[in-house]
């Protein structure tokens, strides 16, 4: 083979390798982006949270759909009055079990994560926001989407669903049928200044169960795993 | 150096780089394979679980050894009658702390993971399978092996050991000496239609403790860390 | 472009790619190093723990600063009398949510991790070390630093802070104001044979809260997120 042709070939190989390495770096960027979200949530760093979102982000929470960073600002707007760490308030967000898949053009990604939350209010805290239980556990799943803009990964779709919530004293076998801390939205923004832009059907609440749709096929069979069964 | 020689050298470097990138991609594939196992287990997706295994897989569970996908099908065969998500049934498998090492030929890998399970049955569930406690915690360690067949990673050795189980109301300080939900196997397949192919000695059960053997040496000294002490 | 020039360029590209791949491999090495720390802590493998540290390591624990591997040996020296797994003793260290950043020279790295610990003593254990609660939870954050020496990553700065500790029976809403198992240091080594080399101000203890300083800027804005608010 002529040196010229060899060079052309190697350049091609180099290019494909560069893409593969880039995808690994993207995966790392996206998984740590979601982990950082968790660390900020621990301490109610809501301005930092909002800045993780793309301008055209969409956020699903309960039966509400929030649009754009403005929507994010309402959702994380400190309805509780919290902003930053506060004496006696606990919100430990363990985020784990990352399944991040980056699109071949490396501009978007999807990620599934699990959250395990320990939250509550210490008995010595006098002025706690109402409706936060003394101590509770929450488990949930994220199936988020991410976008890379000017080389920076951001959250574009925030799609979190609660699997269960339980007061620590009672446990998940005895959870009530009402979600803790939150109630389904009934009025939209701007009538409700913290409300969503749209409503969607109420997601099922534990003890109902559901499969959070998988963004990825079965890793061995390649088949789609349906969520509706 | 002649251009020819330079080209030869670069080709070599490119090859070694390709292997290194491939190993990173393999690590990612194996860790997410195990994480996906966890998400399927959450919802009793047993057909999907069985499809994660290689044809010649070996599964250790309790004092039983199960061979092949047929063995996997018996182990995950829904002895409980469960198959898919069910009202009021909780099996949250948090899988974390991945230590994945890929063989230099990139055909096999070993992985250590931790599992932290929250399980149980909501009080409103009327027809729960017997023997599942109302609410329990379980911790365990996987030391699995994986194989790549036609470019697809599968579980070849499933080696899980329970560290502790505890009813949430009692906690691990007061666990009974009998494992929850399961009893050691006494009869083999086919006499026992869900039985193992072979028996092995009963693994220790909490409050006994053990070191799950490490598949990797100490990361600094390079010494093997023995499990028998 | 002449073949010579092309070769020079490709060599440069190859070099930069090699660095990028190396960084991915470093991230993997550092995150698994910290995860291995957790698995060793599960079983009180203190000699293995000490070997994870660089000779010039610094360790912050409570209000103590320990210097060097000798300091590490005092800190992990088995004040409890424990060394290796023991009947009825539980110390499950779930380590997760890794944020590892490798310096561009690939000689040092920083890592933030979360720990969620389930610990205690089974009721059937007769000779348990004093001061270990029957069953407790602990959450904490590491902001560690790592160094690569002769190609081997080691922990150089160990910086762990407890977010909360709670007896399982009481939960974090009812934690006492004294830390479990430990008391602030009052005397230094060598007067205290297990003491630190230096004291520092007592870190806040739950129900006080704090932001563990982030070693990384905000991933979207690039701004430093201050810890003092």
Image (tube, coloured by chain):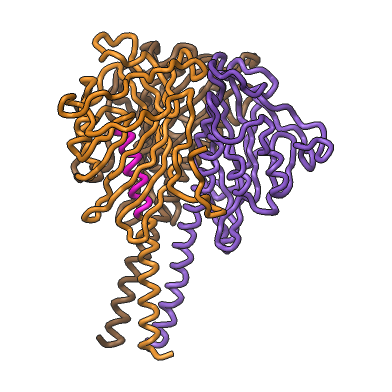
Chain colours: A purple, B brown, C orange
The C terminus of chain B, quarter of image: top left
Q: Residue furthest bottom?
A: C2
Instruction: Please name whichever residue, B192 or A144, is drawn nearer the observer in this view of the structure.
Output: A144
Instruction: Please name whichever residue, A118 or B81, is drawn nearer the observer in this view of the structure.
Output: A118
Q: Residue furthest right?
A: A191
* Residue B129 percent coordinates (x, y): 56, 17
Q: Quadrant of residue A171?
A: top right
Instruction: Please name whichever residue, B228 or B55, is drawn nearer the observer in this view of the structure.
Output: B228
Instruction: Please name whichever residue, B194 or A50, is drawn nearer the observer in this view of the structure.
Output: A50
Residue at 47% over, 15% down:
B167
Residue at 42% over, 35% down:
C141
Please state the extent of the stretch shown in magenta in the rendering: C26-40
Q: Is residue B91 visible?
A: no
Residue at 61% over, 35% down:
A83
Q: Is B228 situated above or below C222?
A: above
Q: Is C144 situated above or below A91?
A: below
Q: Is residue A223 left or right of residue B116?
A: right
Q: Is residue B229 left or right of residue C214?
A: left
Q: Is residue C152 visible?
A: yes
Decide whether the magenta segment is chiefly helix, strand or loop: helix
Q: Is A140 situated above or below B203?
A: below
The N terminus of chain B, quarter of image: bottom left
Residue at 62% over, 14% down:
B123
Count of numbered badges drawn on the protein: 0
* Residue B70 percent coordinates (x, y): 45, 36
Q: Quadrant of residue C166?
A: top left
Q: Is residue B190 left or right of residue C183?
A: right
* Residue A76 percent coordinates (x, y): 66, 38
**For residue B42: magenta?**
no
């Amino acid at each position: 083979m002529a040196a010229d042709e060899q060079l052309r070939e190697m350049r091609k190989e180099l290019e494909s390798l560069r893409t593969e390495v880039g995808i690994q770096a993207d995966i790392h960027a996206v998984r740590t982006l979601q982990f950082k979200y968790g660390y900020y949530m621990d301490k109610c760093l809501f301005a930092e949270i909002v800045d993780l979102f793309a301008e055209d982000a969409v956020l699903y929470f309960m039966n509400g759909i929030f649009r754009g960073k403005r929507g994010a600002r309402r959702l994380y707007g400190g309805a509780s009055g919290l902003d930053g760490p506060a004496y006696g308030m606990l919100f430990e967000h363990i985020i784990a079990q990352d399944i991040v898949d980056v699109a071949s053009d490396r501009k978007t990604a999807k990620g599934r994560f699990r959250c395990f939350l320990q939250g509550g209010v210490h008995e010595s805290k006098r002025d706690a926001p109402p409706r936060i239980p003394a101590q509770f556990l929450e488990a949930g799943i994220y199936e988020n989407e991410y976008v890379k803009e000017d080389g920076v990964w951001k959250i574009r779709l925030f799609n979190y669903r609660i699997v269960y919530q339980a007061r620590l004293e009672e446990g998940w076998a005895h959870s009530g049928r009402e979600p803790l801390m939150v109630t389904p939205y009934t009025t939209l923004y701007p009538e409700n200044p913290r409300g969503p832009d749209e409503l969607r059907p109420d997601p099922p609440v534990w003890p109902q169960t559901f499969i959070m749709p998988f963004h990825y096929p079965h890793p061995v069979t390649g088949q789609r795993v349906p969520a509706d069964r």
